[in-house]
Image (cartoon, helix red, strand yellow):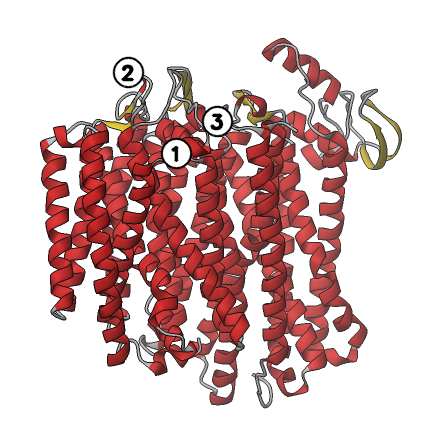
Amino acid sequence: MDALLLSRWQFAITTVYHFLFVPVTLGLSIFVALLETCYVRTKRPAWKAACQKLVKFFGTLFVINFSMGVVTGIVQEFHFGMNWSEYSRFMGDIFGAPLALEALTAFFLESTMLGVWLFGWNRLSEKAHCLAIWLVAFASNLSAFWILVANSFMQHPVGYVLRNGRAEMSDFLALVTNPYVVGEYSHTFFSGMATAGFVVLAVSAWKVLHDAASRAAFRQSLMAGALFMFVGFLGAAGSGHLHTQYLAASNPMKLASMEALWETEDPAPFAIVASIDEQAHKNTSELKVPALFSFMLYNQPSGAVQGINDLQAAQESQYGPGDYRPDVTGLFWSFRFMVGIGGVMILLALAVFLLTWKGDPLRFPLLLRAIPWLLPLVYVVNSCGWYIAEAGRQPWIVVGLQKTADAVSPNLTGADVSLTMIVFTVVYLALAIVALGLAFRYIKHTAIPFEGRA
Amino acid sequence: MDLHVIWFVLIVVLFIGFFFLEGFDYGVGGLLPFLSQEDRDRSQILRTITPVWDGNEVWMITAGGALFASFPHVYATMFSTFYLALFLMLLALILRGVAFEFRGRREGRSWRRFWESCIVFGSVVPAILWGVAVTDLLRGLPIDASMVYTGGFFDLLSLYSVLGGLTFLFVFLFHGAAFLTLRLSEPRLVARARKLGRTVGGIAILLFVLCLWLTYVQTDLFTRPLAVIAILGAAVAFVLANLLLARAKDCGSFILSALAIALTTAAFFAGLFPRLMVSSLDPAYSLTITNASSSPYTLSIMTVVACIFVPIVLIYQIWAYHLFRGRITQKDAEDEY
């Protein structure tokens, strides 16, 4: 295999792996901050003690997860120069700024305050200590914002001019207020809440079921986690819906590929399932709801949606001969998986919240038992989301400006990249197993006694 | 002042911050197996850096990000040139990063020893690689007219660059030892750190001198007065740091070793200026602060950002160090968070 394909694989592996941890960091930092706020504010001594233990409990899961996110984040930053030097040359004038801003405004704050929070329990007042975790939460989410500003430029370039053989920034404000980033950021933010909420839910469900001494405390976090997760999934659905509507204008090729809509139609139907023939550029069979796709995009059962074949022809006339179609099959099914599972999760979160609120969750042992086994689904859903975002802009690395094939470092050999990719992947796998093992052990062996209700 | 020069200076500042802070982290990590065989001692030693190592590492990440934003061609050429070297460094940093987190989570000798060896590996390898990179950059690398590196991994290694790598390692080990004399509380551990510091410091002086001599022979650094002043100042500061450590003037020793690291970094960049990467094929192919930079617009935006946030970062990082001042005791190391 050549350096280009291998570099793409290496970046994809690192990105997917990195984003297993990122949403938990984004959401769990907020959850722990909220929990510590409860701890600081509560007047009931019994709950205060249990609440602090819960803060430390979820805080520990947070840092195990955080350390994995940090070490892979550095790999991401380095990859742009290591594997994608021509991209860095062409885009550096624009792309470097948000990365530097992330480090300066967010990552410094996040890592410094996390150290302060972890080791500062006895050195700070309760309120100051609580402020530290809020700063961690703020900085984590600010960091995501800058990264998504950078990513949004790749999806939908704004505020630039082509000059001196490269893209140069002409409007910083346009870059930061790219409408694309609104959709990407809100969707990522709520996905973080949803993922972290589900992690809290799964851990709490297990503890409620298996650890009688800690049951009362984890019943509280079960309810809180369900609510957090519900808000997260609901927000993710809403922001995802609005972002999809926006795609009709900003990236119709990605949109049409998500729906495997080959020909322009008015009104456009929504295919629930389809058998896609990418070679013939059509679907051999499909089960579809008439006009639903137009309705989803325009809030009315009419309106044309451009098809892949027309868009391909239009792009060929604009950019010259070439294949401008992304991986239609992968996008189609990723989108269905993401929306389908996400929808079910909204109901699951709501159900668990109501059942726990109304009475003893132990009335439903089967549900509690099933929840931890469903947890991997949310990770798959997150990966599907990023697959749609990143595979959906191929063959471009920056839509309309530079192709992925032109972005790779010219001095790399296939052997170089094979070596690094294999070693990175093996190390990632080994570390994931160790981190999971540590988390399981910690969850199993940590008891949080608590008498009565909060 | 010219924006390109401002950004050159800012990059120098970021690298000084990085080498000063991560220097003692790497040093503590590298000295770990020689300081004590006792698990409880090692927990105390590591506790001196666990609250701060991540914040320190962000100096490197910021230096990388700032290089990307201000001199994208340097970022592109440098990172692709050092592809396999950076891969090794990333591997080391990944293992070191998780090791700080994982080590204390289980008892058991083999568990602890395994992650300690990751910390040693993750501290020693980056220290050496940065030395290799710095000497390679001073001497020049085969970079062609389109700013692309034309050599392979082994072209990065020479007597000079290996010596550079070892010099960095031993200077950082000394820096770490001086840091530990200020942060540990048990007298026998402090004495041990001081004794080790004197040993590695002696080796570091020897390597430093050899490295200076090869720098004189192989690079044009000594044709630049500012660089000469800085590097000689660094040498003097480092020798004095060693003398002070031997007299148990730990604080002075640490300050001087920090000064030596800062001056060495400054000398390195002064030796390059206005170049950032030297081409050994043709001086015209070198990457400079003008031909490798971002547009004036991006530079001016980033200048405003840097002028606001670098001081803020400094304030809260100094506050964090102030919060964790005081020597680490057995109790600190045992306190679970």
Residue at (37% x, 69% y) in the render? B46
Q: Are marks 1 and 2 in contact (CB under 8 Å)?
A: no
Q: Secondary structure at mark 1?
A: helix
Is residue B160 or residue A38 the one in the foreground? B160
Query: Mark 2 is on which residue type?
Result: Ala
Query: Mark 3 is on which residue type?
Result: Tyr
Q: Quadrant of the N terminus of chain B?
A: top left
Q: Secondary structure at mark 3?
A: helix
Residue B314: x %, y % from top left: 24, 54
Residue A399: x %, y % from top left: 56, 25
Residue B180: x %, y % from top left: 26, 68
Quarter of the view holding residue A272: top right
Residue at (61% x, 43% y) in the render? A422
Of mark 1 and mark 2, the one earlier in the sequence is: 1
Q: Quadrant of the C terminus of chain B?
A: bottom left
Count residues near mark 3 (Cα–Cα under 10 Å), then give few for <14, some for 14-19, many for 20+: many
Label disc, if present, on residue B156 of the rendered structure? 1
Between circles 3 and 1, the one closer to the viewer is 1
Q: Chain of mark 2?
A: B
Residue at the disc numbered 3: A87
Q: Chain of mark 3?
A: A
Residue at (74% x, 60% y) in the render? A347
Reply above or below: A87 against A10: above
Distance from disc 1 to disc 2, alpha carbons, whole Å, reads 21 Å
Label disc, if present, on residue B284 of the rendered structure? 2
Between circles 1 and 2, the one closer to the viewer is 1
Is residue A327 or residue B196 the one in the foreground? B196
Distance from disc 2 to disc 3, alpha carbons, whole Å, reads 23 Å
Query: Mark 1 is on which residue type?
Result: Leu
